[in-house]
């Protein structure tokens, strides 16, 4: 009996290659950057360089720290922790005057 590997192709999820996804994302970023550069939307970022640098630094450090935790802390602990952090952040932003 010969097995047809494409017999149930309609039930499989079809994902584009990673190169296509990356190219689509990168193109979108370039278009947005070009659009906002022309209408001086980045002026507020230049005016608040210290804030932008602090946010970027915190984001990079958190990403590295989170990546290191992936192998050391079980997923069952990390996911609820992330949910709690995101909810606390959302509440803090919502209550800001």
Image (cartoon, rainbow, N blue to C red):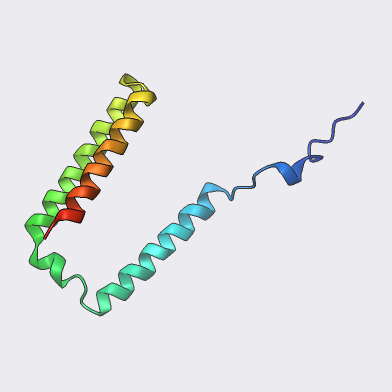
Of residues 17 and 81, which is closer to you in this image?
81
Of residues 93 and 13, which is closer to you in this image?
93
Q: Position of residue 87 (x, y in %)?
A: 27, 43
The residue positioned 23% from the left and 32% from the top of the image is 65
Which residue is farthest right?
1
79 to the left or right of 10: left
Of residues 94 and 26, which is closer to you in this image?
94
The residue positioned 21% from the left and 48% from the top of the image is 91
Residue 44, above or below 69: below
Q: Position of residue 97 (x, y in %)?
A: 11, 60
Looking at the rendered image, the quarter that the N terminus falls into is: top right
55 to the left or right of 13: left
Q: Position of residue 37 (x, y in %)?
A: 26, 74
Tell me which corner region of the image, top left, top right, bottom left or bottom right, holds residue 76.
Answer: top left
- Counting labels gives 0
The residue positioned 7% from the left and 56% from the top of the image is 50
The residue positioned 31% from the left and 21% from the top of the image is 73
Tell me which corner region of the image, top left, top right, bottom left or bottom right, holds residue 69.
Answer: top left
Which residue is farthest bottom?
39
Residue 79, above or below 38: above
Q: Position of residue 32 (x, y in %)?
A: 35, 69
């Amino acid at each position: 009996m010969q097995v047809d590997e494409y017999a149930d192709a309609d039930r499989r999820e079809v994902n584009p290659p990673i190169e296509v996804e990356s190219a689509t994302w990168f193109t979108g970023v370039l278009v947005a950057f070009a659009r906002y550069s022309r209408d001086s939307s980045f002026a507020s970022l230049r005016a608040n360089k210290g804030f932008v640098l602090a946010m970027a630094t915190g984001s990079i450090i958190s990403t590295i720290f989170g990546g290191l935790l992936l192998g050391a802390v079980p997923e069952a602990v990390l996911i609820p922790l992330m949910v709690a952090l995101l909810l606390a952040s959302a509440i803090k932003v919502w209550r800001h005057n």
